[in-house]
Image (cartoon, rainbow, N blue to C red):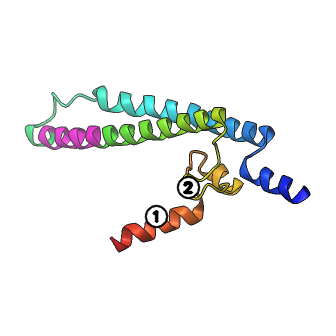
């Protein structure tokens, strides 16, 4: 019976552990949303430094730089939005009791990994195997 209980405990995290992860995720979500807002503003608003009064050569160079910068900010914003979505999905997994369970192996993902990457859905072993399989294709 004791052996059975140990196995059962290893299949899921406790309510207290899940609450710790929820707090980590909520903190990361708050920061990620603030960062996304800054990135979105950076690529949707033009900067206050107008180039209308500079020489034509500098104006062309600066406009090119602004376009590149806006494109980069747009890419970074899209990446940040994916990160936010992943964090929100992790909160859903906490609610439905599947948080911290590797989607490949069904085993518990280590606490250390979840503290570092709270939206992880793969254990280190599964992630390593996935990378190996992708390299071999």
Q: Secondary structure at mark 2?
A: loop
Name, please, the residue furthest toward the bottom: 136
Q: Is residue 47 visible?
A: no
Residue in front for this viewpoint, 121 or 42 = 121
Q: Which residues are magenta?
A: 59-71
Give how far across and how far down residue 110 sits, in percent.
68, 57
Point 15% across, 28% down: residue: 52
Name, please, the residue furthest toward the left: 56
Give the dominant element type of the magenta stretch: helix, strand or loop. Answer: helix
Give the residue at mark 1: 130
Above or below residue 11? Residue 70 is above
Point 52% across, 36% down: residue: 32
Q: Is residue 52 left or right of residue 121?
A: left
Q: Is residue 38 visible?
A: yes
Give how far across and how far down residue 118 sits, in percent.
61, 46
Give the residue at mark 2: 122
Neighbours of disc 2 within 10 Å: few (<14), some (14-19), many (20+): many
Gap in angstroms between the C-alphas marked 1 and 2 = 9 Å
Give how far across and how far down residue 78 sits, in percent.
36, 38
Mark 2 or mark 1, which is nearer the start of the sequence? 2
**Rendered image quadrant of residue 98:** top right
Residue in front for this viewpoint, 126 or 58 = 126
Residues at circles 1 and 2 in contact by the CB criterion of under 8 Å: yes
């Amino acid at each position: 019976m004791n052996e059975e209980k140990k196995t059962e405990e290893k299949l899921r995290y406790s309510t207290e552990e899940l609450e710790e992860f929820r707090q980590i995720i909520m903190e990361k979500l708050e920061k990620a949303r603030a960062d996304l807002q800054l990135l979105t503003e950076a690529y949707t608003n033009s900067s206050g430094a107008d180039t209308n009064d500079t020489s034509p050569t500098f104006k062309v160079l600066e406009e090119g730089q602004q376009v590149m910068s806006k494109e980069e900010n747009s890419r970074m914003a899209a990446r940040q939005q994916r990160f936010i979505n992943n964090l929100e999905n992790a909160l859903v997994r906490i609610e439905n009791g599947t948080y911290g369970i590797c989607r490949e192996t069904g085993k518990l993902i280590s606490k250390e990994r979840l503290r570092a990457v709270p939206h992880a859905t793969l254990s280190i072993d599964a992630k390593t195997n996935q990378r190996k399989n992708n390299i071999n294709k």
